[in-house]
Image (spheres, grey):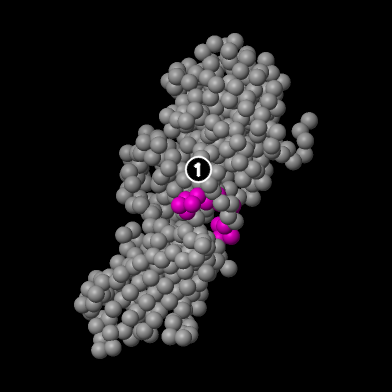
Amino acid sequence: MATPGVLCFRDITALAPMVRVGTLPMRLLALDYGADIVYCEELIDIKMVTCERVVNEELDTVDFVAPDERVMFRTCERERDRVVFQMGTADPDRALAVALLVEKDVAAIDVNMGCPKEYSTKGGMGAALLSDPDKIEAILTKLVQGLSKPVTCKIRILPSMEDTVRLVQRIERTGVAAIAVHGRTREERPKHPLHCDFLKAVSGAVGVPVIANGGSLDMVKSFEDVAAFRSATGAAAVMLARAAMWNPSVFRRQGLLPVQTVMEDYLKYAVRYDNHAFNTKYCLCQMLRDKVESEMGKLVKTAQTLSDICAAYGMQAYYEEVQVLLRSRRGLHPPETPVTLGGVTTMALRFHRRDYPPEITPKMFLLEWCRKEKLEQPHYHTLIRGSRYRPISVLWLQVDRPQDRLFLSTVTVDNKEKSKKGAEQAAALVCLRVLRLPEGRRGEEQQQEEESGLGGKRKRAVAPPLLAAAPPQEEQEEEREVNKKIHLSDREAETEVTNGNHHKTHMP
């Protein structure tokens, strides 16, 4: 009988951990369709241990943010009691440090001991651990003894059935709550047949729940097949990877939904939780499968923003609706009345990259205005002061007037090193706002054409001698890379895609 509040691994169907796929939108969608437990993608301990836990009030999420501002792991209340955090590790102490960091926000901790790909096996992680049972035991024992949440692991079978059984029995003695077993060896791939006999032998050799994995291609096409897969392996539970990646409604007891419906449901979560556009494209292309070169597939692959992707699916209205909601939460449009004190004009505003078309930024508009007015181009400089990092982006704008006035925009951010680019964009934005020039924001195309240096002429505006934007905890965001191709190497995908979100700092 399951203990209240403790995750149960018997008689369940789980979303398997999948790199680039198991991000928050896919996990929530799988739960909606009927999955009992969802695993996040494998996250490497070396990267996670440097993260800071941040409550993101704008998105209603908890973000684990790396020093470079990338969101390595994002979760929310909806999944807290059913999400399993999977890490890649080969170090017991570092594994425990990461587990303690995320423990209160997840239902269980899992160690990846089965992924055969190079980005996982480097440094002795993933399937490389299968040849080092002493380290497996050390890692799992450390986690079980140091955590209050259940600890599990995911392995692959060994070439010998006897060796596989012995390994699983040794793992059981560490006190883990469950063991997921992929029914192929480290060298085998999906084209190789699944070894159900190994899974059955393992399931009968231990008392801890065994979760059977690897049946998507051979045995599971819809939820009706899950029971047969469980019976063939004698396992206590089933974990689905590719079948769920292709159509997450495989978890629906009522049957599969059309892929088009599933993709639209997925995209709603991607927009709602500001999922990285490239990661969103990747997941949608997996669902399109052989239709990835269709008209729809081409629109998805060439899209560069979530807005573009929504337009391809006729969901632009939904995208705009969510943006209005998020703007209201982060106070994107505060009162714009400048406040001048001691010769310094301060304006509370923020630069948010998503509000601007690709390759359009306030800095670009300010530069074009300076060129049109035959002024020296703006100069940006980052200062660091105090014992803690406190970057200040400063913009000098020399205007050709008799007094040679100096226009200065300063952006001060939180007591941590933030994006220099974001600070510079905000500095330029303050100048544009007070000079009453176009800013390049989406939806202002006509005004931009008529009033910016890119279009017609405009009379020089008069501004105070000193402009400053210095609200503490200023939201920063590095410019996202555009024109990414849909295919990256596994290593690039791990660093650029699955963890590609940038944290949005909440400003009260």
Q: Say whether residue 232 is magenta.
A: no
In the depicted view, which residue is nearer to us: 216 or 78? 78
Number of dots carrying numbers: 1
Q: Which residues are magenta?
A: 56-70
Residue at x-position 39% and y-position 65%: 382
In the depicted view, which residue is nearer to us: 250 or 184? 184
The image position of residue 94, as x and y in percent, is 58, 38
Q: Is residue 317 visible?
A: no
Left or right, residue 283 beside residue 13: left
Residue at x-position 35% and y-position 39%: 487
- What is the residue that sits farthest to the front in this orientation? 387
Residue at x-position 45% and y-position 30%: 122
Q: Is residue 272 above or below residue 240?
A: below
Q: Say whether residue 62 is magenta.
A: yes
The image position of residue 66, as x and y in percent, is 50, 50
- Secondary structure beneath disc 1? helix
In the depicted view, which residue is nearer to us: 464 or 277? 464
The image position of residue 24, as x and y in percent, is 54, 46
* Quarter of the figure with residue 396: bottom left
Q: Is residue 397 above or below residue 184?
A: below
